[in-house]
Amino acid sequence: MTPEIDDYFAAVKAEHGADSLARVEEMLEPKRRSDQRHPLQQAAKWILPGIPQQPWHDPYAYAELLPLVTALEDNHAQIKSEQDEAWDRSRNSFSAYEHYLVRQQNWQALYLYREGALVSTSEAVAPTAYRVLKENAVDNGVICPLLESHFSTLLPGARIKPHCDLWNFSINLHLAVDIPAGAGIRVADETRGWTEGRCLLFDYSFEHEAWNGDGAPRTCLLADLWHPDTTLPERAALTVLMTEIQKLMAIS
C-alpha cells in the first residue's frame, strides 16, 4: 500500500477501532489462500473474507436495499416508457458497454451513475430512473462509488461470455425493464430468467454470463451496490484503496 493509504487506514481505525479494517487487510495479504474461495469465484481479483459465498440473493431480504428495490419496481412502467422513448429518439445517449474485460457493440448502455457521481445529462433522458436512483441509492450511500448504474441493453443474439467481476464487496441489482423470450442469466451453477418489473440480486464475483434471443432487445436497469455484509468503515477504506489501485493500473 502507499503511504497515503496507510495513513487513511490508520485514521479509519483510530475512529472506528483497531479491528474495523481487519477483513480489508486480510484481503490484501499476498499469500491469501485461493482455496478459501468458491471454485467459481477464482477469477475475481479481490475477495473480502467473511462475505457469504452465496451467488444469488433475495432482493427483498435487506432493509438497506429494500427502499431502492421497492421504488424501482413501483416505478417500472414509467421507467420502461422513458427507456423506450430514449432508445427510439435519443439513441446517441447509449454507447457500447465497456466492461473491464471487453467492449461490445451489441451490449448497449445508458449510464445514470458513473465515476462516483450521477450522470447529469441522463436526467432529461430517463428522469424517473434517475430520480429513484438518486433518492434511494446515491443520497443514502447504498450505491458503490467505485462502479456504476446503467440501462443495460443486449441486442438480439447478443451474449456476455462467462466471467467473474473484480470483487465480492459490491453486489449487482437488476430491474427487469423489457424482457423478450429467450433471454437468460447464469450465476455460478444456477440459470434464471428475468420477470419484467421485478428485481434480481446476485454476487458477480461468481462466474456469470447472460444472453438474449433473436427477437427483440433485452433491457435491465443495473445498479452496483455495496454488499449488505460490508461495514461503513470497510466501505470508506475500500473506496480509497480501490480508487488508488485503479489509478496505478491505468498508469501502468
Image (spheres, rainbow, N blue to C red):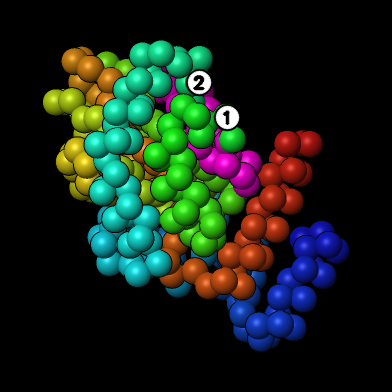
Q: Where residue 247 appears, x then y in whole percent?
A: 74, 43
Q: Is residue 30 visible?
A: yes
Q: Label 1 crowding class (10 Å Cα cut-off): few <14, some 14-19, many 20+? A: few
Residue at 58% across, 36% down: 119
Numbered circles on residues, count: 2
Structural distance between the alpha carbons of marks 1 and 2:
9 Å
Residue 221, image quadrant: top left
Q: Quadrant of the N terminus?
A: bottom right
In reply to whether residue 244 is colored magenta, the answer given is no
- The span picked out in magenta is 98-119
Q: Are marks 1 and 2 in contact (CB under 8 Å)?
A: yes
Residue at 64% across, 70% down: 25
Q: Residue 144 got which mark? A: none
Q: Residue 121 got which mark? A: 1
Q: Is residue 67 above or below residue 81?
A: below
Q: Is residue 167 visible?
A: no
- Name the front one of labels 1 and 2: 1
Question: Residue at label 2?
Answer: 93
